[in-house]
């Protein structure tokens, strides 16, 4: 094709080219097929809607709401997972409890607990936070305890040999040694949390004035504002890419740099 | 005249074993394996003298590593006592610094300098003092140029030198080494043996070194403890101080003797060739 080798290009450039191709295909489909604009928005219409709604805050507000709910849920999930994992690491009984709970709850899709959460908390944010926390806690706990289990015994022996207390062996040896697993647990948790929060907001439909992104999309669907549906979806996708690269940067500075994970 | 008596007085208890640093009496050791409990050491009575280099040698499964772990305080004997300065029931501590065979004994998330300095901070040195002291010991092990690398960027021999520097920086009473050069190539191994000899003599640390190499035992040891096959006892303790280099007839004679001691014991053991 040309003298420029695809694999020789920097990652950012390769991705940019792919995004352009994708948008071009999208535009081509809209132009050629004469699809009903009420049902399918063009890239241009989506872009202008994105611009307008970000500027007047009607998309920014739901985005922050969703991110805040997500952070709360993931934060609670991680905290609970850490406590569970510490118990599981300290005793056989704790390990069995974690194993059983994980095998029961981990296969459940995050939104599956939503009906119960609605009964317990009402139709509000707390119910969604609960569902996210539930979706987060199990993958984090699985990965963390796998991380703790695979720490080389020699490293733990060194920790005790240099005079670390049991607690400091956990904080100064086990925790950093388990970091590669912890980060991959975090990535899974974040992805599960995302799906759960959007799905939960869609299920709730219109719930008060402080709805999130799912709510924004659902509202747009209700009023047949298809470009807004697209704008909401694009926002979700962009945020996904942003967080993915944040996690990638975190790994490059830690586990990859330390030779604990291949780059 | 006064000096001579002083030296003699200092040496006398060592030679007679009157004031050992570690005293093992009737020690019985074993460990759990997937196949069940393995009695490794039937009974061992042994004194480790201050500032000596004691090498423990024996066939696989004879409990030489377990013996080291017991002195380090990781394994409690099933029977008998292990006393350090008269204290029994030892817990692990930085006064008996361990060096393992495995390369993964370094903290991968810390630099070479960090690996040596961190245990010092744990033991009460402030950040600056720990770093300065760590640098001294990295110089001693010829690693000062690599202070800011991470362990995964080092060769096996360099990793073991970091582990030795880390152990010695703690100024332990004892340096306990579990086949630290076992996974290294022959040339690196020889170089590290010479380096260790120099450093241990200079720091006057008491060394207990486990190996299954007769040559390594002769190069490093003041005394060599030969263990039998499991459940083991001490077959013999030999003094190898005055042997001279590998060219001397005494050296070859001693090597032959240790070989036959280990071989006699191995005769019924199919696993060892």
Image (cartoon, rainbow, N blue to C red):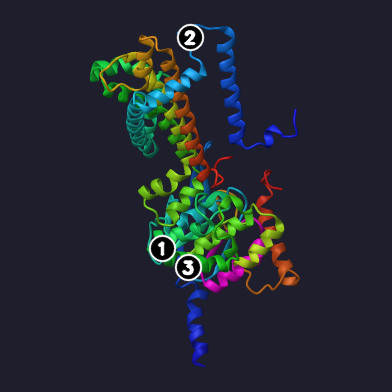
Is A8 situated left or right of B108 in this image? right
Name the image quarter holding the C terminus of chain A.
top right
Residue A208 falls in which quadrant of the image? top left
Binning the other alpha carbons within 10 Å of mark 3 as few (below 14), some (14 to 19) or many (20 upward) gives some
Res A102 seen here: no
Residue shown at 61% from the left, 34% from the top = A13
Rounded to the nearest angstrom, the CA distance separating label 3 from label 2 is 73 Å
Q: Is residue A54 above or below residue B128?
A: above
Residue underneath mark 1: B127
| Closer to the camera in the image, A67 or A85 | A67
Is A164 situated left or right of A11 in this image? left
Residue underneath mark 3: B133
Q: Is residue A119 above or below residue B161?
A: above
Residue B118: say if magenta.
no
Kindly indicate whether the residue at mark 2 contacts the one at mark 3 (C-beta within 8 angstroms). no
Rounded to the nearest angstrom, the CA distance separating label 1 from label 3 is 10 Å
Segment tinted magenta in the rendering: B197-224
Q: Residue A57 location in percent, x, y?
A: 34, 27
Q: Is residue B169 above or below residue B156?
A: below
Q: Residue A230 location in percent, x, y?
A: 45, 17
Please tell me the numbered disc located at residue A37.
2
Q: Chain of mark 3?
A: B
| Secondary-structure class at tag 3 | helix
Residue A185 falls in which quadrant of the image? top left
| Closer to the camera in the image, A194 or A109 | A194
Residue shown at 50% from the left, 74% from the top = B14
Q: Chain of mark 1?
A: B
């Amino acid at each position: 094709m040309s003298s420029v080798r695809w694999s020789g290009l920097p990652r950012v450039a390769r991705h940019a080219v792919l995004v352009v191709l994708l948008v071009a295909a999208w535009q081509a489909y809209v132009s050629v097929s004469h699809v009903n604009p009420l049902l399918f928005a063009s890239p241009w219409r989506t872009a202008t809607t994105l611009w307008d709604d970000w500027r007047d805050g009607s998309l920014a507000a739901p985005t922050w709401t969703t991110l805040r709910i997500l952070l709360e849920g993931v934060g609670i999930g991680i905290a609970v997972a850490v406590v569970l994992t510490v118990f599981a690491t300290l005793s056989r009984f704790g390990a069995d409890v974690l194993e059983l709970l994980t095998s029961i709850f981990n296969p459940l899709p995050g939104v599956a607990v939503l009906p119960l959460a609605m009964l317990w908390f009402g139709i509000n944010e707390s119910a969604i936070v609960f569902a996210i926390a539930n979706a987060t806690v199990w993958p984090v706990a699985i990965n963390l305890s796998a991380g703790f289990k695979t720490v080389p015994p020699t490293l733990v022996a060194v920790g005790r040999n240099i005079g670390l207390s049991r607690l400091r062996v956990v904080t100064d040896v086990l925790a950093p040694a388990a970091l590669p697993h912890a980060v991959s647990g975090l990535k899974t948790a974040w992805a599960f949390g995302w799906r759960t929060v959007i799905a939960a907001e869609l299920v709730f439909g219109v719930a008060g004035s402080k709805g999130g992104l799912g709510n924004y999309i659902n509202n747009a669907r209700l009023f047949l504002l298809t470009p807004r549906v697209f704008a909401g979806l694009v926002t979700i996708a962009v945020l996904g890419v942003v967080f993915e690269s944040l996690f990638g940067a975190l790994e490059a500075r830690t586990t990859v740099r330390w030779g604990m994970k291949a780059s | 005249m006064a000096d001579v008596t002083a030296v003699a007085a200092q040496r006398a208890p060592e030679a007679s074993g009157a004031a050992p640093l570690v005293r093992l009496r009737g020690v019985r050791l074993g460990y759990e394996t997937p196949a069940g409990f393995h009695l490794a050491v039937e009974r061992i009575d042994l004194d480790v003298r201050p500032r000596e280099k004691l090498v423990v040698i024996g066939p696989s499964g004879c409990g030489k590593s377990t013996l080291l772990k017991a002195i380090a305080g990781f394994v409690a004997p099933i029977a008998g006592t292990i006393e350090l300065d008269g204290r029994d029931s030892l817990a692990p501590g930085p006064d008996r610094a361990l060096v393992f065979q495995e390369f993964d004994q370094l903290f991968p998330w810390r630099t070479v300098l960090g690996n040596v300095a961190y245990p010092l901070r744990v033991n009460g040195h402030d950040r600056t003092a720990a770093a300065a002291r760590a640098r001294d010991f990295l110089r001693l092990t010829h690693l000062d140029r690599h202070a800011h690398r991470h362990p995964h960027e080092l060769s096996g021999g360099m990793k073991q030198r970091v582990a030795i520097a880390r152990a010695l920086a703690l100024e332990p009473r004892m340096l306990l080494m579990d086949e630290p050069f076992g996974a290294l190539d022959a040339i690196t191994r020889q170089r590290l043996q010479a380096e260790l000899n120099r450093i241990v003599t200079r720091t006057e640390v008491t060394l207990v070194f486990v190996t299954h190499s007769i040559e390594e035992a002769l190069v490093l040891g003041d005394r060599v403890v030969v263990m039998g096959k499991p459940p083991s006892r001490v077959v013999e303790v030999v003094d190898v101080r005055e042997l001279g280099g590998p060219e001397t007839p005494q050296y070859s004679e001693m090597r032959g003797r240790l070989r036959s001691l280990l071989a006699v014991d191995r005769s019924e053991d199919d696993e060892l060739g």
